[in-house]
Amino acid sequence: MTMFDLSGKIALVTGGAVGLGGGMALGLAKAGADVAIVTSRDRTREVQEQIEATGRRAHTIVADLANEQALPGIMDEVLDKFGKLDILVNNSGIIRRTPAAEHAAQDWHDVLDLNLNAVFFLCQLAGREMIKQGSGKIINIASMLSFQGGINVPGYTASKHAVAGLTKALANEWAGKGVNVNAIAPGYMATDNTSALRADDKRSTEILGRIPAGRWGTTEDLEGPVVFLASRASDYMNGHVLCVDGGWMAR
């Protein structure tokens, strides 16, 4: 099990105060990592307290990830607090549900700014540090809509296809420099982003009927996969999009 040990590692998780991000941040801490969490507003410190309860250090950064000018400051704060960065989990994202013919330009830009632009620029900032130290793990959060088109979510679908492509492009450049870049594609998870779907009895029944596991995913379902991709156990994985979907893509 030492291959999965993250003792002495420093992780940065965006959107780490709630939902899937909170679950992954806690999973990394359970494996031994100290964790910096980026949140868009000063939410409850529940996840930070849970991390600290494992005996690991935690630090919360409040920042607007859609503001490109704020991103270097996030990296500086992590380096000032912890001295290095070993693991980046690009989890933050939003979704706007509107038919494509009525999809507002501002919705398109809002989604792409956070779901794609922030991902690239944080990868770039982290990648520079990791290349200098000769090691690092970058884990981007993709989606089932990195492979499919979805309905009424053109901006989200475009962003998640792009995240999958970006993951492969960066892996091609950085694998030989000791930096692993991979992605996790969660299936239909019980989070704020899917609250509208879960509240729609017809749509929820359709979705559950297509998931072989027969249930929505939970935050705990991502703890193992993120630890795997952050650890030595995945050292020869590069540019892979790992589906954690209850069998959705196999159906």
Image: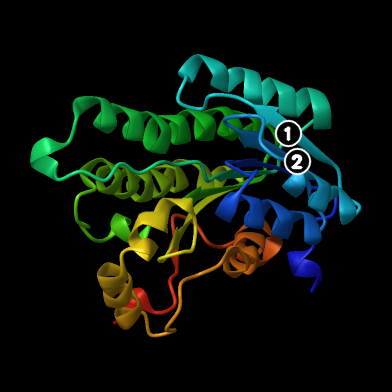
> What is the x, y in percent for residue 245?
43, 71
Name the residue: 80% across, 53% down: 50
The residue tagged 1 is 60
In the structure shown, which secondary structural element does the residue marked by tag 1 occupy? Answer: strand
Q: How is the image coloured?
A: rainbow
- N-terminal of the pair, mark 2 or mark 1, is 2
Considering only vertical position in the picture, is 160 above or below 5?
above
Determine whether, in the image, residue 122 is placed left or right of residue 211: right
> What is the x, y in percent for residue 26?
72, 55
The residue tagged 2 is 45
Front one among 244 and 15: 15
Considering only vertical position in the picture, is 59 above or below 203?
above
> What is the x, y in percent for residue 199?
37, 62
Q: Which amino acid does label 1 sit on?
A: Thr
Considering only vertical position in the picture, is 88 above or below 143?
above
Image quarter of the C terminus: bottom left
> What is the x, y in percent for residue 103?
17, 36
Name the residue: 63% across, 34% down: 38
Question: Quadrant of the rendered structure where residue 200 is?
Answer: bottom left
> Mark 2 near mark 1, Cβ–Cβ under 8 Å?
yes
**Residue furthest toward the left?**
101
